[in-house]
Amino acid sequence: MSIYTCPHCGEKTFTPIKKAVSGTMKSKGKPCPKCGKLCVNGKGATVFEAVYCLIAFAFIVVIYLNGLKNEWMFTHEMPMCICLLASMYVVPRLVNAFCFRLVQSIRLDAYK
């Protein structure tokens, strides 16, 4: 069930899962099954991932610095940091699957 259109050929060839793993503009991208050209999620996806990862990292630093001051936080510090690190990988891909449009890959090294 392809619901997203390829920016190169205009055909609906991308599923939400393929779109989620196609990456942001800093990645190589995924080839369109129809035309074979590389597609990535747009600038909005790149900005969202950078901002989300920066905020999650700030929370990890705050948890680390305040872990000794609070007994509950001290005992739950490691699971909270692991969940934040996992969310830095999962949340941007979930958002990429449904929110941002596909664009052509502009990386020069992706075509070598």
Image (cartoon, helix red, strand yellow):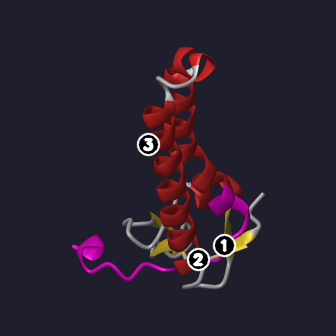
Mark 1 or 3, nearer chain start:
3
The residue that label 3 is drawn on is: 61
Give me the C-alpha separation between circle 1 and circle 3.
29 Å
Image quarter where the C terminus lies is: bottom left
Q: Residue at x 59, y 84 (%)?
A: 9
Q: Residue at x 51, y 35 (%)?
A: 63
Is 35 positioned to the left or the right of 95 in the image? left
Q: Are marks 1 and 2 in contact (CB under 8 Å)?
A: yes
Mark 1 or 2, nearer chain start:
2
Give me the C-alpha separation between circle 2 and circle 3.
26 Å
Residue flagged by tag 1: what amino acid is it?
Phe
Q: Residue at x 69, y 57 (%)?
A: 16
> What percent of the width, then of the height, locates residue 81?
50, 32
Quadrant of the image occupied by residue 48: bottom right
Residue flagged by tag 3: what amino acid is it?
Val
The residue that label 2 is drawn on is: 44
Mark 2 or 3, nearer chain start:
2
Instruction: Judge whether residue 87 is colored magenta.
Output: no
Please report the bounds of the magenta region as a residue range.
95-112
Between label 2 and label 3, give the one nearer the viewer. 3
Between label 1 and label 2, give the one nearer the viewer. 2
Q: Is 6 above or below relative to 30?
A: below
> What percent of the width, then of the height, locates residue 99?
72, 68
The residue that label 1 is drawn on is: 100
Q: Residue at x 71, y 71 (%)?
A: 4
Q: Nearer the viewer, residue 42 or 112?
A: 42
Dot 1, crowdedness within 10 Å: few (<14), some or many (≥20)?
Answer: some
Q: Is 95 above or below relative to 89?
A: below
Dot 2, crowdedness within 10 Å: few (<14), some or many (≥20)?
Answer: some
Residue flagged by tag 2: what amino acid is it?
Gly
Instruction: Judge whether residue 109 is colored magenta.
Output: yes
